Image (cartoon, helix red, strand yellow):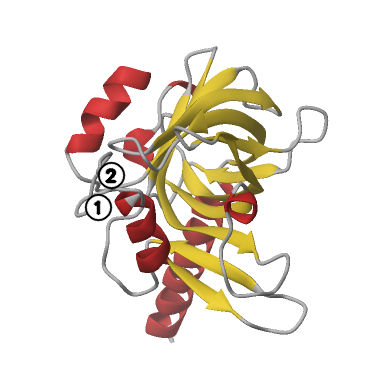
């Protein structure tokens, strides 16, 4: 009988400890909108700019893509070898009637390629960042002819899933990690350089989300070259 009582007390203590530990975790939801520029023609491709709204405002951000193995454009040829590679490697055509489009996945599903990386920096000195498990870019085939035209590439939709790791947090996010998402537009603003504007709406109604917590966090790993980007754009 005494053993059963002791066992019951032990199980109760474990349960109480587990509940107490869970209740000690702080959860917070952060909202953001973004407006920045960048280009897949740059090496490396970095989209950076301002956090224009939400709980992270004011601040700055960058999202960087790993372009290992991407060719450079040869100015002596009529085609753009770099853009041709990006389209051929990352985008796939969806011929579904009424939904004709090219969908690009960075990195391609199950490819093992490095994920895009990101950082947010608030004016108050707080930092949060990590990796994008996947960034999806969609180009609508407006005339459903299966040929990607410059006007169609110029107006794209972009979305991404974010993972924030504890080792990239600072300030009020020093002990936090989490997940999040964003969606918006990616439009060409300079046809010659293929510079693009990344816009996540909107300053008045921020659509980006980060769901943060200060418990159960893991450490993120990324290529060392991105460490220099972090120091440049902090």
Circle 2 SS class: loop
- The residue sitting at 28% across, 20% down in the picture is 231
- Cβ atoms at labels 1 and 2 below 8 Å apart: no
Label 2 Cα neighbours within 10 Å, binned few <14 / some 14-19 / many ≥20:
some
Q: Position of residue 102 (x, y in %)?
A: 56, 68
**Residue bearing the label numbered 2:** 73
Q: Check the image and report above or below for 129 versus 50.
A: below
- The residue sitting at 77% across, 78% down in the picture is 98
Which is nearer the eye, 106 or 205?
106
Nearer to us of marks 1 and 2 is: 2
Occupied quadrant, residue 167: top left
- The residue sitting at 57% across, 69% down in the picture is 147
Rounded to the nearest whole Å, what is the CA distance between mark 1 and mark 2?
Answer: 10 Å
Circle 1 SS class: loop
Tell me if 123 is positioned left or right of 87 in this view: right
**Residue bearing the label numbered 1:** 70
Q: Position of residue 204 (x, y in %)?
A: 82, 28
Which is nearer the eye, 75 or 193?
75
- The residue sitting at 81% across, 35% down in the picture is 205
């Amino acid at each position: 009988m005494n053993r059963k009582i002791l066992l019951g007390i032990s199980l109760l203590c474990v349960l109480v400890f587990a509940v107490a530990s869970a209740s000690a975790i702080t959860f917070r939801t952060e909202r953001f909108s973004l407006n920045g520029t960048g280009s897949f023609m740059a090496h490396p491709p970095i989209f950076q700019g301002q956090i224009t709204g939400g709980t992270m405002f004011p601040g700055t951000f960058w999202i960087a893509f790993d372009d290992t193995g991407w060719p450079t454009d040869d100015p002596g040829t009529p085609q753009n070898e770099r853009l041709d590679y990006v389209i051929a490697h990352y985008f796939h055509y969806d011929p579904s009637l009424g939904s004709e489009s090219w969908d690009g996945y960075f990195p391609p599903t199950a490819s093992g390629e490095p994920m895009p990386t990101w950082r947010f920096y608030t004016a108050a000195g707080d930092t949060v960042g990590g990796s994008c498990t996947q960034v999806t870019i969609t180009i609508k085939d407006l005339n459903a002819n299966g040929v990607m035209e410059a006007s169609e590439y110029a107006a794209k939709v972009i979305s991404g899933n974010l993972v924030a790791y504890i080792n990239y947090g600072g300030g009020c996010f020093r002990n936090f990690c989490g997940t999040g998402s964003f969606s918006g537009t990616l439009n060409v603003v300079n046809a010659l350089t293929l510079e693009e504007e990344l816009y996540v709406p909107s300053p008045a109604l921020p659509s980006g989300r980060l769901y943060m917590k200060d418990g159960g966090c893991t450490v993120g790993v990324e290529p060392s070259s991105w460490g220099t980007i972090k120091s440049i754009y902090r």
